[in-house]
Image (cartoon, rainbow, N blue to C red):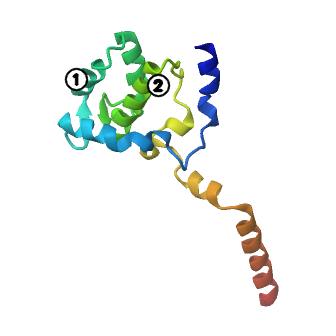
Amino acid sequence: MQEQLQHYDFSKFPSLKDWIVSRDKHRYDEIFYTLMPINGKVTGINAKKEMMNSHLPNTVLGKIWKLADCDKDGMLDDEEFALAQHLIKVKLEGFELPTELPNHLVPPSHRKNPTADIIITLNSTEFCQRFLLCILFLSYID
Ligand SMILES: [Ca+2]
């Protein structure tokens, strides 16, 4: 158990570009749409019924709910729901839940700064080339 915990380092997963939950999201989406979402969101009651199928204790489910309901509106959209299911899976596999949702687990549509993706993916060589082109261009104008 202890060893498993060490292997499951939440911070190691690649950041913003790759939302780990998206790997299984198609499966979670299937469940999501059986819960009769309204305006793209399932109610707390419906989501909780589904979460209780995991047979995890209520205290754990409450914790998962808090982590998954990113905008704290008492409903889960498809991404929040997928995140909840992901956290349930993590817990069922014997890993501990994070006390706060690490950035890389935050659903893409709930991230505060979506442009960070672009900045990070802009590789440094490309940046240097553009920078040099700018200098060249400016020296032409002079
Ligand atoms: Ca929500």
Residue 136 appears in the figure:
yes
Q: Residue at x 59, y 52 (%)?
A: 116
The picture quadrant for ligand 1 comes to: top left
Work out whether residue 31 or residue 123 is closer to the camera in this orientation and state it.
31
Residue 96 against residue 83 in the figure, above or below: above
Query: In this rendering, is residue 5 above or below 112?
Result: above
Type of amino acid under label 2: Val
- Front of the two marks 1 and 2: 2
> Is residue 59 left or right of 127 when viewed as pictured?
left
Q: Is residue 69 visible?
A: no
Name the residue: 32% across, 40% down: 27
Q: Quadrant of residue 138?
A: bottom right
Q: Is residue 88 left or right of residue 74?
A: right
Residue depicted at 64% across the width and 54% down the height: 120
- Quadrant location of the N terminus? top right
Question: Measured from the top left, where is residue 30 in percent x and y?
Answer: 26, 40
Q: Which residue does the numbered mark 2 point to in the structure image?
A: 90
Q: Secondary structure at mark 2?
A: helix
- SS of the residue at dot 1? helix
According to the picture, the residue beneath numbered tag 1 turns out to be: 45
